[in-house]
Image (cartoon, rainbow, N blue to C red):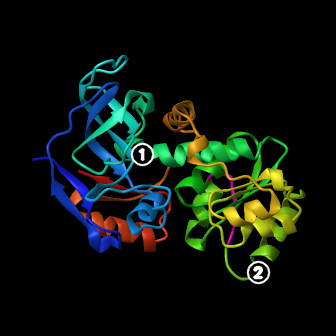
Amino acid sequence: MPRQVSFDQYGGVEVLHLSEVEQPIPGEGQLLVRVMAAGLNPFDVKVRTGKVKEMIKVTFPSAQGNDVAGVVEAVGPGVSGFKPGDEVAASTSKRGAQADFALAPQATALLRPANVSWEVAGSVWVVGTTSQAMVRAAAIGADDLVLVSGASGGVGALASQLARHRGAAVIGVAGESNHEWLLSHGITPVTYGDDVEARIRAAAAAAGRELTALLDVAGDGYVELGIKLGVAPERIDTIVDYAAAAKHGAKTEGGSAGTTADVAELLTLINAGEVELPIHASFPLEQVQAAYTELEHGHPRGKVVLVP
C-alpha cells in the first residue's frame, strides 16, 4: 500500500513515522501526483511541534509537507492543462506531500522544466513564494544595497539571488562554511555572531554605499539592527520577527503573499541557470526522522529533501 509520513501527537522528530494509507482519489480540480521528491520546510516543524496550533488546526493522525514534485498519475474532474504522465512541481492544499502519492490543486501546479531536478522541483514552492514576496515587499531595485540575514538557507539563498537578479548589491549573513557559495553568486558574505554589526558596516563601507533594505530570514534582532544601520522600516521585510516588525512598522510579507506566477518565474530562472536552489541532502522516505534532524540541527545550505 502507499505510504505517507504521519504523526499522531505534537512532539519532536520521534513522533514521525510512516503509515500505510489508501491511494488518494483526485477531486474537482485536483491532480494525483506520484511523488518523486518532497522538500522539508521549517514551517513543517512548527506544525508538528504545535507552535502554530492556534493558526493551523491539526487532526490526528496528521500528514505532513506541502512542497512536492512528481508524475501526474490521474486528474480529477474539471482539470485542464494537465494529463497523466506530466511531470510537475506543485504545492498541496492540505499537507500530505511527504508520501508516495499526493493530491495537489491544478492552481498550484506547474510543469517541471527540463533542466530543473526532481529535488529542486520538489522544494521550490514554499521558499519560492516566500523569497519572491520578500523581494517585492522591500521594493528591491538596482540602486539598493541589501542585507539578507540567514542568506544560505532555502529562503535566504533565493532572496539573495533574486535581489542580485534585480541589480542590487547584496550582503549576506551566514556561517563561514557558506561564504564561498555566496561569493560565487555575487553576494558579499559576513559571518553572524558577536560584532556582526561592525562586519556589516565594514562590508557596506567597502561597497561605498549605505544599506537601503533588509530581508530578514533569521530573526535574532536583525530588524532592530537594520533600523540602527539606517534602513527605513518600509524597506525591511521579516518572516520571523513579527514583534519587532509591529514595533517599528516593518513588513512581514511571506509565502502567503506569493503566487503561482512567482514560482513559474523562479523555475524559469533556475532552468536557465540564472538562479540556484541548493540541495543540501536527500533522504529516503523511511529516514524522515533523520531528514528532519538534519533540517533542525544541521544548518543546511539550501534544502533537505525526501525522495520516496
Question: Circle 2 sits in a helix, a strand or a loop, which is it?
Answer: loop
What is the x, y in percent for residue 128? 54, 44
Mark identifier at residue 120: 1
Q: Which residues are magenta?
A: 185-191
Disc 1 versus disc 2: distance between alpha carbons? 35 Å
Q: Which residue lies at the image location 55% right of the left edge and 37% below the top edge?
A: 266
Closer to the camera, 45 or 265?
Answer: 45
Residue at which label 2 appears? 195
* Horizontal side of residue 31 vs 297, given as left or right: left
Q: Quadrant of residue 11?
A: bottom left
Extreme residue in the bottom direction: 194
Circle 2: residue type: Asp
Judge whether residue 255 is colored magenta. no
Residue 164 seen anywhere in this rendered image of the structure: no
Q: Which residue lies at the image location 49% right of the left edge and 47% below the top edge?
A: 126
What is the x, y in percent for residue 205? 88, 64
Q: Quadrant of residue 6?
A: bottom left
From this view, report whether residue 263 is shown above or below residue 48: above
